[in-house]
Amino acid sequence: GQENDAAQAAAGATIFAENCAACHAANGSGDRTQGAPNLTDAIWLYGGSREAITETVTNARFGVMPNWNARLTEDELRAVAFYVHGRGGGE
């Protein structure tokens, strides 16, 4: 429900700030010089569904970002994917 969604988004925001903002910026706008894409627009390199974002964060792709499954728990991965999905105009 919405309460769970709000909690998930809040947890995701914290995880993002602690792990992702170093490259993607605190507001998610990214840093092209580091190869960190903007996460606030509707452009998704590997798909913008929550499942696709979770897959990207978990296993990385061919880019610069590491896979996070060794550093974040499954719940943390889901929470940060939920947060990023919402920031990029996901429903």
Image: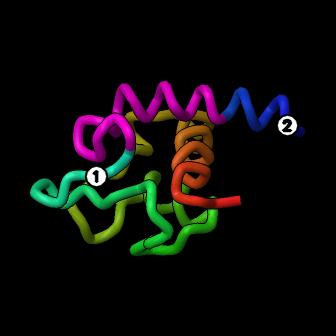
Horizontal side of 64 relative to 91 (left or right) equals left
Q: Which residue is drawn at 30% across and 60% down?
A: 37
Q: Which of 91 and 80 is in front in this view?
A: 91
**Where are the magenta residues, as a range?**
9-27
Secondary element at tag 1? loop
> x and y percent of residue 88 in the render?
52, 58
Q: Name the residue under label 2.
A: 2
Q: Residue 72 at x, y = what percent? A: 46, 34
Tell me where residue 85 appears, x and y as whole percent. Answer: 58, 54
Mark 1 closeness class: few <14, some 14–19, many ≥20 residues within 10 Å: many
User: Taking 63 as reference, is 22 above or below it?
Assistant: above
- For label 1, the residue is 30
Please determine whether, in this image, residue 89 is positioned above or below residue 70.
below
Q: Say if the magenta span includes residue 16.
A: yes
Query: Looking at the image, is mark 2 or mark 1 earlier in the sequence?
Result: 2
- Please identify the dominant SS of the magenta region: helix
Q: Where is residue 22 in the image (x, y as percent from the top left)?
A: 24, 36
